[in-house]
Structure formats: C-alpha cells, structure tokens
Image (spheres, coloured by chain):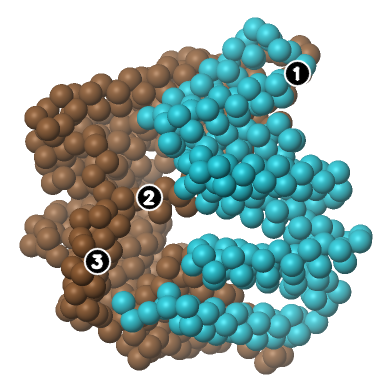
Amino acid sequence: MRLYAESSRETLRARKLLREWNDDGLLSKEQYEQLEQETVSDLRTTNIFLRLVLLFFTILAVGAAVGLFFVVSGTKFSDSTTGVFLLVFAVLSYIAAEAAATGGRLYRYGIEEALAICSVVLVCLGLSSFFSREVFETAQVVACSVGAGFSLWLWYRFGLWYAFAAAMIFTVFLPAYWTPSQMVQRCCICVLYAAALAGIAAIRSRHRFDYLEQGYSLAEAFLWLGIYLMLNLKLSDPGVPFLWFSSTHSTAEFAAPFYWTTWVLVWCLPPLILTRGVRLKDRFVIAAGMITTILTLVTNKPYLGWQRHTWDPMLLGIMLVGVAVLLRRWLAQGQDGVRHGFTAANMSAKHKHAMGVASSVFGLLTPREITPAPQSQTPKFESGFGGGSDGGGSSGDF
Amino acid sequence: MLYLGSLVWCVELAYIENRFHILSGQWDLYLLATALLFFFLAYRFDNRFVLSLALSSLAGWFGLTVSRWPSFQDGAYRRYALLYCLVVGVSGAVLRRLKLKPHFFGTYLNIVANVLFWTILSGVIDHQEYGPWLLGLLIACAASLAWGLRQRQFAFVAYAAVYGYIGVSSMLLRNANDATLILMYFVVTAIAMVVLLVMIARRFGKGRQA
C-alpha cells in the first residue's frame, strides 16, 4: 500500500545517517566511500531549496492549467458541472503524482508532492462546488471528511508528514456540522485526536528503529499539540488576540465546570507530554511538551482573569533562560556529562546546515519583533501583552 | 539559550525605554547598541542565531523594516537598503578573509541576498523608472545562480529562480488584461521553470540517485 518499497526507504535512511556520520568525522574516507556504494537507492531526491521551488512552480502550473481550462472553455458552467470538472482534474493530478513517484522515482522532490497537494485541494473544491446548490452544509461536511481521509491516505501512501497535519485541520471543521455547542465540538475533536493518538502509540512501538519512526513521532507530536490546542480555550478561541489584551476572561460560551476542567487539563498535559517524550527519547514529542508548557504559562493569566503586565514577557524569558541554564548544568554534572542517556553537549553536526538556514530566516523575520517602537511624546500605559507602542515592544515598527 | 537571552534583552530594553524614556527621541541608538552587543555575543559564543539578530538590529538602524516593504514607493528607502547590503556584504567578506568565524559568511550572504532581491524587486514592480532595476535584477539573478552552482549552495539557485521569475513576470504581465494569455503564460513558464530546475539539479548531481 505504501508507494515506496521498504528497502528503498531504509537505504535512503541509511545513506542519510552515513552522511551525518561522515560530517561528524566518525568515518574515514575509505569507510565512507565503501559504505556509500552499499547504500545506493533507486529513489531520486533533491535538496530542500530546490524541493520548495519545484513545489511552488508545480502548484503554479497546475493552478494556472485548471484556471485556463475554465477560461478557454468559455462556457458558464453550473456549480455541479464545475465540481465534476474539478474532480476530474483532481483525479488527473493524483495520477500524475503517482506516476511521478513510481515512474520518475521521485521522492520528496517537490513535483510529486505538489501534484498530491493539488489533488486534495481540487477534490475539496470539486465536492464543495458539486453539492453547494442543494445543501451547503452537506457539501462542507463531505468536503472536510473526504479532505481528511484523502490527506491521511497521502500521509500513508507518500509518507508526507504535513498531510497528517492537514488531515487534523480538516477534522477540526467536522464537529461544527454535528452540533452547534462549542463544548461538544471541542470534546468530539479531542476524542478523535485521542483515538488517533492511541492508534499511533500502539503502531509506532513496532517501528522504534526503522524508517517509519520519524513519521510516527511527528504524527504523535501533532496529535498532542492538537489536543492541547483544543483544550486551551484561550488559544483556540477565534477572538484570542482581543482576549489576551483583555483583563477579563469570557466564560459566557462555556459552562464553568468545563472551563475550569480545561484549565486543569491544560496544566496536566504538558508534564504528561514531556514525560512521554523523555521516556521515548523522542525529540518531536519533547518539543511538543515544551511548546505546550510555554503556552500554558502564557495563557494562564487570561485563563484566571488576572491583570497582564508589560513585564510579564520579561519574567517569562528570564525564567526560561534560568530553566535552560539549570538543566544544562544538571546534565553536565552527570558522569561524562550524561544523565539517563541525555546530554547537553553537541553530539552531532547534523543540525549545522539547518541552523545556518534557520539563522538566515530569523534574521529576515525578526527586525520588527525585537526592537522598541518609536514613541509618542505622551505615552500612556495600559496592561497588555507587549503589543502596540506602549507594550513590551514586541511588535513595534521602527 | 543565548538566543533566548538576547530576545529577553530586547524586551527589557523596550520596557525600560517605554517606562523611563532614557533615550527618548533617539530610540534608534538602542538598535545600534543592540546590534553591536549582538555582534559581540555572536562572535564570542559562535552563535549564528544571535548573528542574525545582530544583522536584523543593524537593518533596523538603517531604517529597514519588513513592514515597510509592501509600499514599494520609497526610492530613498531602497537606497538605504542597498547601502545596508553593501556594508553587510563587504563586512562579511572581509571577516571571512580575515578568517574570523568564516562559517558566518553564509548567514551574511543569505541575509544580504534576500534584502537585495527585495529591494530590486520593489524597484521592478514600481511603475516608474523600472528599467535599471530590471537590469539589476537580471544581473543579481545571474550572479546568485552562478554562486549557488559553483558553491553548491542551492538556496541561491532558489533565490535566482523565484525572485527572477516574480520580477520578470511582473514586468511582462504589467499591461496584460487577457485572462487566457496570463494563465497560458503561467502554465508555460511554470512548466519551463520546473524542467529547467530539474535539469540543473541533475547536471550538478543534486538530483542524484540517492
């Protein structure tokens, strides 16, 4: 059922590890050359930059081709006819993706990914358009359900990690058509995510050291994050930016027991996720645990309806730095700088390239985030989370 | 940790200035001081993330912000951006030649390339006197492509492809009103770009049989 043979994926993984070990200086030149010859895969890959550019241009070509068809045909189609044509394009796009992957042996090459992404988008648009005249809600339910299912299929078939995240996003919209109650909707989504989490946790134990481990690890991290976001009413609320600036919390939509239960769960989940991540030595789950911990600290005051202060981000930052320093020192004091299999020392050079790219991206994105805003002559002080010209300066212009 | 500490420094600085107005009216001095501090920290602790913060702060001191770019109207603003690119690019090259953290050069170059391409693109998209900017874009794309292929840094190939495509397309489609023609243009050129990039990848071994 998977598109790529297990042996091909394993060989690719081995080759990737080989390059990392070579970059770390763990292999001699002879060893590297010999092992390189033994790990030749039939799959064609490319680097991340060309992959992104190829993805961009393929999506552009498919989108323009679909648009061109409707413009050139010159006929004003009915919604259902438009839907049928879009579904036909979706099928063609999917067939092209399969052909690129099987015939062209493309693996994470951008082209086959773009075709697969286009097929999901076209299916959803096609179904929405096909049903929209009769029953709008049915159209949305069908489009979201098929979108979720199709995304899951792509995740399984092509191994595209972001297809799993897309399936989760499609799932978020489904309960809205089952019940108008926000509480029940959130509970439904949490139950669905929890069921998926249980399934993933059961499956991944069998793939602890093979090529599927990373994919399952990411899926689990996404599911933990998804559950957390659904439970944290201050984060997933559509009006969250306004609520963060407000000193009062809105409990009107939710019954008090539900509201305070979510508050308790929001505090319970991060340690649970972190514990699981540490126990499995899983980077992605640990990262999910850290993100949820920080989000819990950030949203606690709005949750409790307490006043926010301009110095809150500073205290949070100082606390995070303090925790990082303590943790690092604690790990370093272990035997050979290792405690329970964890070390603060940089063991591998495999992230150097990623850090180089990330540092450039941060450099481009941070200018307006890090610097104080120009002030008016008569500043006034309000409570708020840093924003504006009189907050913590985290969103000013200069 | 250092990156986090640097961000906290920025927040604290912003708070102090907002609260006590120590340098009221000359807030840009904070940017210069912050940039210098971050440069020192980046080189002292060999941290490229902090270097990127230093370059961002320096860009702020030059008056460059991401939020200003969509205006695409300010000729003076573009001059400052070019000056920034020149200063940072030359500094990065000199420091590399002096063998002072030569691996930082990539960060310098990436940021300079992006700021430069944004500047040139804003000039191309501008409806007045876009000719020299278009010429500049073509030269920059050729240089970026050549550098990327020679150094096997495919980020620069990607910059040349995307920025070049956007710039040339915006010029060619500037007065086009026919939807068929525009869509046809995108279909043909996008496929051509895909084919070209695949050929480049294959030729230079990046699209190798892994």
Q: Position of residue A24 (x, y in %)?
A: 27, 53
| Residue that label 3 marks | A29
Is A220 rendered above or below residue B159?
A: above
| Subunit under mark 3 | A
- Separation (CA) of disc 1 from disc 3: 57 Å
Q: Colour of chain A?
A: brown
Q: Nearer the viewer, mark 2 or mark 1?
A: 2
Q: Position of residue B28 (x, y in %)?
A: 71, 24
Q: Residue at x 82, y 46 (%)?
A: B79
In the shown orientation, is residue A32 left or right of residue A184? left
| Residue that label 1 marks | B26
Q: Colour of chain B?
A: cyan
Q: Which mark is residue A352?
A: 2
- Separation (CA) of disc 3 from disc 2: 21 Å
In the shown orientation, is residue A301 left or right of residue A186? right
Q: Is residue A248 visible?
A: no
Quadrant where the C terminus of chain B sits is bottom left
| Residue type indicated by callout 2 | Lys
